[in-house]
Image (cartoon, rainbow, N blue to C red):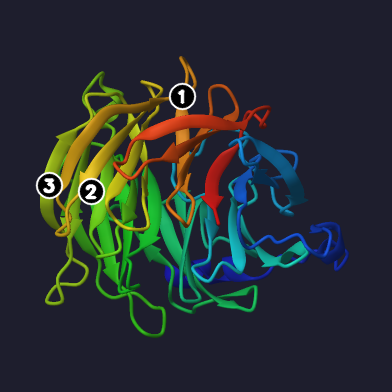
Amino acid sequence: MITSRRHLFRLLALPAVLAISFSASFSAHASMRNGKIFTSSNATDGNIVLVYEPAADGSLALFASVATGGLGSGAGLGSQGAVTLSRDGHYLFVVNALSNTVTTLALRAGELKVTSIVTSGGLHPISVAEHDGVVYVLNDQGEGSIAGYRNDHGDLKPIPGSVRGLSASAGTAAAQVGFGTDGDVLVVTEKGTNRITSYPVMANGLLGDTVVTPSAGLTPFGFAFDPRNNLIVSEAFGGAPGASAVSSYRFTDAAPASPLIVSSSVGTTQSAACWVAITPNGKWAYVTNTASSTVSSYRLGGAGKARLAEAVAAGTGEGSAPLDAAISPDGGHLYVLSGGVFTISTFSIATDGGLMAIGGASGLPASSVGLAAN
């Protein structure tokens, strides 16, 4: 199975002119590496990265738009991580679900530029993750798979033998791929099987034996790791009214890829909890409840214990359907992409974890997915 897919790793035979067409230059003082918010249009006629810049009042202004050279799905991906920044902040990775590709863009002082477009190693890529130059992409169609790459100065190069299956050959409905805080584990959530599939990550970027763990609650969706490598996972419970929850897990040196439950299904009292974002200090986690159009907040303990702080820490507006969420590196702001009203909302984060709406942006493409902030 792996051998038959290796041809999918070849770089697309795109004209050299793309390197020029898919770049955007700005004034010399403009910086792409801090104070920006990134999303993608996910449009079927050409995916576009949209870059927003926050003002002092919390409003967001469109700063740049750059074509990825791939095609979006034109609809929600049901995933977290469609747009991801590298840990060093120098690169942005974007999935192109319809064309089965992943685009890498370099963030430079006065330029955002496409540096590579590669096939995703499978069908319908929906999530991408990076840790210290190793990149893995999650594909949710066909049999479902993950595929690994090395980021060589913006050029993604496939890692031979890195294409791996998920916990089952069909019906996984995978939602996200992500690295642990220290990069020693790679995790995939599977909505369809109610499982968390994880893999130890080797020094060469390859993965060890697959570990399959039943989710504490139904429909595990988005997740994030806190600074202590504790895993916080949202549980949508199939969208049942008021049934959503969050669970947390920890990893040990003895079993670095086996998640151990810490907090089991701590309810939000809201519906369809999907996306998770954690403050840089590891004290607060925020979960978007798509069906309730709300954001719930959780207080996180040092051992990964999750306690509901506010069931409704913020609202995004009736019918807004909040999706992706991202937190600024200084921990001062939460950004939420809402698919029902095509907006990004900005919330200030207080020291006690409270949220206050202070602005945002409207008029986003209806198919927009993914959110990242630097």
Q: Nearer the viewer, mark 1 or mark 3?
A: 1
Judging from the image, what secondary structure is the residue with disc 3 in?
Answer: strand
Q: Nearer the viewer, mark 3 or mark 2?
A: 3
Going by the numbered disc 2, the residue's amino acid type is: Arg
- Can residue 253 be spotted in the picture? yes
| Coordinates of residue 353 in the picture (x, y in percent) | 31, 41
Q: Is residue 19 above or below residue 36?
A: below
State left or right for residue 62 relative to residue 284.
right
| Coordinates of residue 48 in the picture (x, y in percent) | 71, 46
| Coordinates of residue 240 in the picture (x, y in percent) | 25, 21
Q: Residue at x 53, y 22 (%)?
A: 340
Check residue 150 in the rendering and tell me which mark sits there, or answer none: none
Q: Residues within 10 Å of mark 2 (few under 14, many from 20)?
A: many
Q: Is residue 244 above or below residue 319?
A: below
Q: Residues within 10 Å of mark 3 (few under 14, many from 20)?
A: some
Residue sitting nearer the eye, 365 or 141: 365
Q: Which residue is mark 2?
A: 195
Q: Nearer the viewer, mark 2 or mark 1?
A: 1
The image quadrant of residue 110 is bottom right
| Coordinates of residue 88 in the picture (x, y in percent) | 53, 71
State left or right for residue 323 relative to residue 104.
left
Give the spatial CA distance, label 1 vs label 3.
27 Å
- Name the quarter where the C terminus is drawn: bottom right
Please tell me which of labels 2 and 1 falls first in the chain: 2
Going by the numbered disc 3, the residue's amino acid type is: Ser
State left or right for residue 122 relative to residue 205.
right
Instruction: Give the total of numbered labels.
Output: 3
Judging from the image, what secondary structure is the residue with disc 1 in?
Answer: loop
- The residue most toward the bottom is 203
Q: Which residue is mark 3?
A: 263
Residue sitting nearer the eye, 147 or 58: 58
